[in-house]
């Protein structure tokens, strides 16, 4: 299911590198990123859609993983970027993306952030009337081509926190106001050329996507008819899930792409919308399975339950604690060993919620073993913190049996970076 490779020693092999050797060489906890997997994922997804609709673009949702090396790889592959903050715009520019390939979808943005986005030349995807009005006051915004994020009243996701469409969502303009908002933008002198929705994240069922595509296309049709907007692009956002548990299965991406593009083309005809660029914004699908987190078992403890304590925590990988997410875990020197026990795998943060797994079937584990936490490429390092004053881990990139550090492990000094204890507080 998880396509784990082993080498002649029986150890987990990532990008041709021995996971145990990587752990020894670079220490743990360690994120290991497999370059080829990122490229394969990007190409598979791009091909799936573009075979059915030529004018197709992908905007990598870089919030999933903003490592500069990862961003460079995707720049080379020809991706665009979905950026949600000035920091992500800055990172994308630094990684070499032309501003025209960056779509900025901010929410609850400040005027300063709008100014930054405008001056960097990226494309703006407007989330609210407030944002539109404030944008119109910024010099240089006259005649700007913009798009709107619309809430299609469909939401889906692996957890409530990850549902971004529907009545509870803070994102986008309302479906009912769409025509008026596009007209308002035109009256202000903007040139609205795009429409966007993103319904949630971690979706393995094609149905909610289909519903969102249908709804967004109907809205686009009304906006075209009611406000005369000619769409250059229609963007369905991200959200394509990957299997995290052994029981889940992958989306058949070709079948999925065919369904979506068929519906898209039907709706283009129905509303005479011409041939706009079709866009999606995948994050997880591109990078999710391309990394593992290596962590060493530092203590085995038999308390009221049996615990394997490791040297990573929710400061390193938050998803299990934040969303109760399942991440498959294997022992690096015997990834296919039979499971013989159920054990809790706990981190080193001083909180009870710091668990990577509860009652997880595992083979025998000893202190010193290295565990590989799989599918740690998306929303993993990017959601890490220094909580408990623990420096963030290193990241290495592996490819064809070679590895290179792409982010150094933080040191204690990084914990105090930018802090200042005022002299007046010192005795
Ligand atoms: N586009 C927009 C506007 C988004 O907000 C997101 C994700 C994406 C695209 C990419 O979604 P993806 O293809 O990766 O599902 N921290 C959570 C996920 C939050 C996603 C937020 N928005 C997690 O760890 O599961």
Image (cartoon, rainbow, N blue to C red):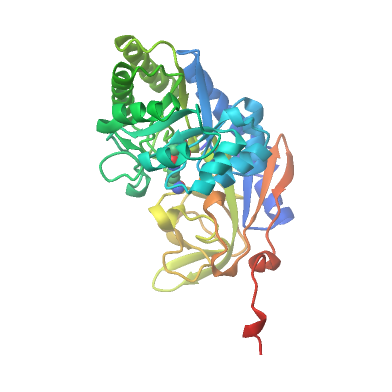
Judged left or right of residue 234, residue 335 is: right
Q: Is residue 270 above or below residue 152?
A: above
Q: Is residue 79 left or right of residue 356?
A: right
| Residue 219 horizontal/vertical position (percent) | 30, 24
Between residue 398 and residue 146, name the one nearer to us.
146
Residue 240 position, x and y percent, is 42, 33
* Residue at x 74% of width, y 44% of height: 404
From the viewer's perspective, is residue 414 above or below residue 5? below
The total of numbered circles placed on residues is 0
Residue 191 lies, in percent from the top left, at 45, 24
Residue at position x 35%, y 30% in the image: 184
Q: Quadrant of residue 370?
A: bottom right
Q: Quadrant of residue 270?
A: top left
Q: Nearer the viewer, residue 165 or 407?
A: 165
Q: Is residue 279 left or right of residue 200?
A: right
User: Visible in this render: residue 276?
Assistant: yes
Residue 388, image quadrant: bottom right
Name the residue at 57% across, 43% down: 116
Q: Is residue 83 above or below residue 320?
A: above
User: Which quarter of the image is occupied by the C terminus?
Assistant: bottom right
- The front one of 251 and 206 is 206
């Amino acid at each position: 299911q998880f396509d784990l490779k082993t080498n002649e020693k029986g150890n987990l092999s990532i990008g041709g590198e021995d996971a145990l050797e990587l752990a020894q060489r670079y220490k743990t906890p360690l994120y290991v990123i497999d370059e080829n997997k990122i490229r394969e994922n990007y190409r598979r997804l791009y091909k799936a859609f573009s075979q059915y609709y030529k004018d197709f673009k992908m905007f990598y949702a870089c919030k999933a993983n903003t490592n500069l090396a990862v961003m460079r790889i995707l720049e080379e592959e020809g991706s665009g970027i979905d950026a949600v903050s000035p920091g992500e715009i800055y990172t994308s520019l630094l990684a070499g993306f032309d501003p025209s390939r960056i779509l900025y979808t901010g929410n609850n943005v400040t005027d300063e952030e709008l100014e930054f986005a405008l001056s960097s030349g990226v494309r703006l995807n407007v989330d609210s009337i407030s944002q539109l009005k404030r944008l119109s006051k910024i010099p240089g915004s006259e005649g700007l081509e913009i798009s709107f994020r619309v809430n299609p009243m469909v939401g889906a996701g692996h957890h409530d926190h990850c549902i971004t469409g529907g009545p509870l969502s803070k994102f986008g303009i309302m479906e009912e106001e769409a025509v008026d908002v596009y007209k308002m933008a035109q009256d202000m002198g903007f040139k609205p050329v795009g429409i966007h929705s993103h319904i949630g994240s971690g979706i393995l069922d094609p149905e909610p996507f289909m519903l969102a595509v249908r709804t967004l296309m109907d809205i686009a049709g009304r906006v075209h008819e009611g406000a005369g907007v000619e769409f250059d692009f229609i963007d369905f956002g991200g959200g394509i899930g990957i299997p995290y548990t052994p029981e889940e299965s992958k989306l058949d991406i070709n079948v999925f792409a065919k369904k979506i593009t068929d519906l898209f083309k039907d709706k283009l005809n129905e509303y005479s919308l011409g041939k706009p660029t079709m866009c999606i914004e995948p994050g997880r699908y591109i990078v999710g399975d391309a990394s593992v987190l290596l962590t060493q078992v530092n203590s085995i403890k038999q308390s009221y339950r049996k615990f394997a304590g490791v040297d990573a925590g929710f400061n390193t990988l938050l998803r299990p604690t934040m969303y109760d997410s399942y991440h498959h875990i294997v022992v690096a020197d015997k990834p296919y060993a039979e499971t013989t026990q159920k054990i809790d795998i706990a981190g080193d943060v001083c909180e009870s919620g710091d668990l990577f797994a509860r009652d997880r079937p595992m083979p025998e584990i000893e202190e010193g073993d290295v565990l590989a936490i799989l599918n740690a490429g998306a929303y993993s390092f990017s959601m890490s913190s220094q909580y408990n004053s623990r420096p963030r881990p290193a990241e290495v990139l592996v490819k064809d049996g070679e590895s290179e550090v792409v982010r150094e492990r933080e040191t204690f000094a990084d914990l105090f970076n930018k802090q200042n204890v005022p002299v007046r507080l010192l005795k």
